[in-house]
Image (cartoon, helix red, strand yellow):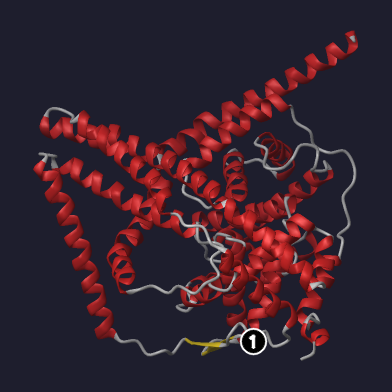
Amino acid sequence: MNNNQQFKLSPLAQKFIEVISYKPEQIYGKKISVDSVVADVASFYEKIRNAMEYQEEEVVFRVAIERILKRKLLLGSNGFKIAEPLVRELAWAKYFPDKTIPEALVEEVAKKINLYIKLYEEAPKIYDLNKNILHEWIIDVMSSDIALTINPNKNIQIVSSFMYHVLDGKIKIVGDEQEDKNALIFINTRRAVAKEDKPFLRYHLFCQYFGSFEQSSFDQVLGNFLKGYNKIEQAFYNPLNEQIYTYIRKRCVPFIILKKMLDGYKDQTITILQDPEQLTSIVSKICSDSYQGIHKRVRTAIVRSVIFLFATKVIFAILIEGSIERQLFGHVSWGFLSITILTPTFLMFLSIFFISVPDENNTKVILDKLKTILYDPEISEIEEVNFSTHTKKAPFLNTVFITLWFFVFGAGIWGIVSVLSIFNVNFISQIVFILFLIIVSFLMFRINQSSKVYNAYEDNNGFLSVLFYFAFMPFVLLGKRLTVSFSKINIFLLLFDFIIETPFKTLFGFFEKWFTFMRSQREKLG
């Protein structure tokens, strides 16, 4: 290739340029505005509330919408009564800047809520569906739809779509229909790049299967709902899911940097992508800034994890551990109980010392990969891979590995119990301590993984590293299950959502109106 050919944008990259050049029609009119004092208090409350629940930062906005919807739908309301308070609550919590959301958008949100309520009411009349499961499913899709209506996050949508089309020609799946293959690549691309959770993925598949959900398409969606529902859920239980996700996650760093370029340089991105020298300079700067932000990202994750641990641990310590100890032993070991509360916290903060930041060589790798993606029509840097649903398994070896895992896990638990027994810790406290140590292992692993989000190198683990992860992974996997389970039964969350939050939000509304009234009276005097 000569120099001119070498840096000519590939057909896919040219299509990417066309997409980012498109400017959607803006909604004009009066914007929603909230009182700044109320917003400061409400946003502080929201940060505390969010930290008590295990969830990724990228889905916090959707989860907040889900929480508000559940609270308001519990009273049997409709879209036109829910939409305006919902958007105002989100504005109070500073999920978007003040005076950026048009009031006209509230009516659109109201119509969407009514459509989903109608779907929830009509579907069980036709299909044999569990109403509780259907309710959760509809809430998942509805909250995702509303989140993307209010905050479309255009750049992540564009980059995720670009990566999907890049990988579509690289991934071959033997034994699955084309539609199933597309769904697998689609959802795992969004998992890797956009860090979306299952409700978001359900919504995207819902759109892929049914198209735009509007009043005009309601009958068509209802008529095919059960078939579409089963097809969507089937995608999450495909045995190839995790293999495909791992393959995609290892190749998503250049796309994450591309998304940051779109966020930071907006319309200039087109010019940057067409000039390799400028691309080199800008990518180097983005990478450098991103690396510096890793410690802040980790600190935020640690603080949120500590709050989650503390809230969950206090519940166990006071309501379970303390009560059972008093019943069985006649007293509560407050000294050790305090230690078991503080130890996980100490371990979480200790994890920050094991965080490493990528270097300039990592930036060079990202740049080389990005240039291949943009300028090489064959995108040769990304190798083709074949997955098969008919891959033969080795049941004997799997049994051996699982047995070894159980042995290592059992040996670890035995070691912890032995140490605690030396200090005469009763078996109730031992069980609770081990449970939270397992949860901490998962949270520490997750924090460590979040620090590697910009690592473009393939993992090159030595024997000791592999051995460590082999011994550590049973604790991590069990810790994930416990974390999710405790999030669902966290009594503090029930108190916040259904007892504290409703009067709090009512007070926020009252004070906002009061401040507005006082301000108007002051202006009359001025």
Say which quadrant the N terminus sits in. bottom right
State the image quarter where residue 349 is shown: top left
Q: Residue visible at 54% across and 49% down?
A: 297
Q: Residue visible at 84% across and 11% down?
A: 522
- Identify the residue under disc 1: 380
Judge from the rendering whether residue 56 lies leftward or rightward of residue 112; answer left or right. Answer: left
State the image quarter where residue 157 is shown: bottom right
Disc tally is: 1
State the image quarter where residue 420 is shown: top left
Disc 1 residue type (three-letter): Ser
Judge from the rendering whether residue 216 lies leftward or rightward of residue 121; answer left or right. Answer: right
State whether residue 245 appears in this view.
yes
Residue 20 in the image: state x and y as whole percent.
81, 66
Residue 173 in the image: state x and y as whole percent.
54, 87
Pick whichever, 274 or 284, lies toward us: 284
Q: Residues within 10 Å of mark 1 (few under 14, many from 20)?
A: few
Residue 151 in the image: state x and y as whole percent.
72, 51
Pick whichever, 507 or 518, lies toward us: 518
Q: Is residue 203 above or below residue 31?
A: below
Element assignment for label 1: loop
Q: Is residue 395 above or below residue 93?
A: below
Q: Residue furthest top?
A: 525
